[in-house]
Image (cartoon, rainbow, N blue to C red):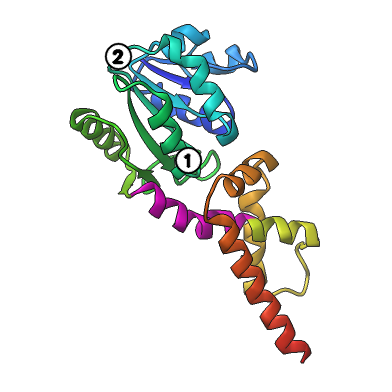
Amino acid sequence: MIGIFGFGRFGELMARYLAEDFPVAVRDTGGNSQGIEALGARAADLETTAAQDILILSVPISAITDTLEMILPYLKPGALVLDVSSVKVLPDKWLGEMLPSSISYLPTHPMFGPDSAADSLKGRKIVLCPGRVTPEQYVCIKSYLEKKGLDVIETTPEAHDREIAVSLALTHFIGRSLSGFGAEELQIDTEGYKRLLHILDVVENDTWQLFFDMNYYNPYAGEVRDSFLYAMEEIKNRLES
């Protein structure tokens, strides 16, 4: 059985897909047992969920260490813990430091969300950063993901966070800025402007907590953000000189 901690939008998506192939226990502090069972999964308490062979942490990045502390007493030797957060350097460090050597861990980042993968996983990407995981566990996880149609990318936590600081954190920064600016559909528009507005669709369903965490816990996000703002200021100065 697979245990999932967290039943937000992404936790719900995982429960729906995984319940097609495995028994799934979900720990939801919000008490949405009806929604969990409607997906074919089972609402469970902390102890039951933490005692499964595979555990998936679908909680905010800022809640990972607290979640690990709660589940530690109930983990069984040989279990595999995965996180699905949008940064990898710090979660990899936390998992390695907090979990006993008898517990395997595999940091992951699904490059899709409840909206983009609502109908299918085929062609979507998922990043795996092999941590402390046995070859058998890793092959099993990777093979399953590929059978579901996912494109598996293997990399290091550092390489992941450097790229995601641009492709995700910066994109959301621009989207939040456009929203704050008041960007909206116009009668007299251009194709380029329409594409720009598409960024709003990307960020509008995500919480501020998710946006804050993907920046605060990524060691490279601040540098990327500053470089982008510097480039904007340089262009502004050229226009006004």
Percent across and percent down for residue 105 are 35, 29
Left or right of 27 in this view: 204? right
Residue lying farthest to the front in this orientation: 97
The stretch in magenta equals 156-172
Residue lying farthest to the left in this orientation: 136
Identify which residue is drawn at 38% across, 31% down: 96
Dot 1 lies on which element? helix
- Measured in 3D between alpha carbons, the distance from the residue under mark 2 to the one under mark 1, in whole angstroms, is 23 Å
Residue 129 placement: quadrant: top left
Residue lying farthest to the bottom in this orientation: 241
Percent across and percent down for residue 41 are 46, 16
How many numbered badges does the structure rendering display? 2
Q: Is residue 139 visible?
A: yes
Q: Nearer the viewer, residue 47 or 9?
A: 47
Say the numbered circle drawn on residue 77.
Answer: 2
Per the image, the residue denoted by label 1 is 90
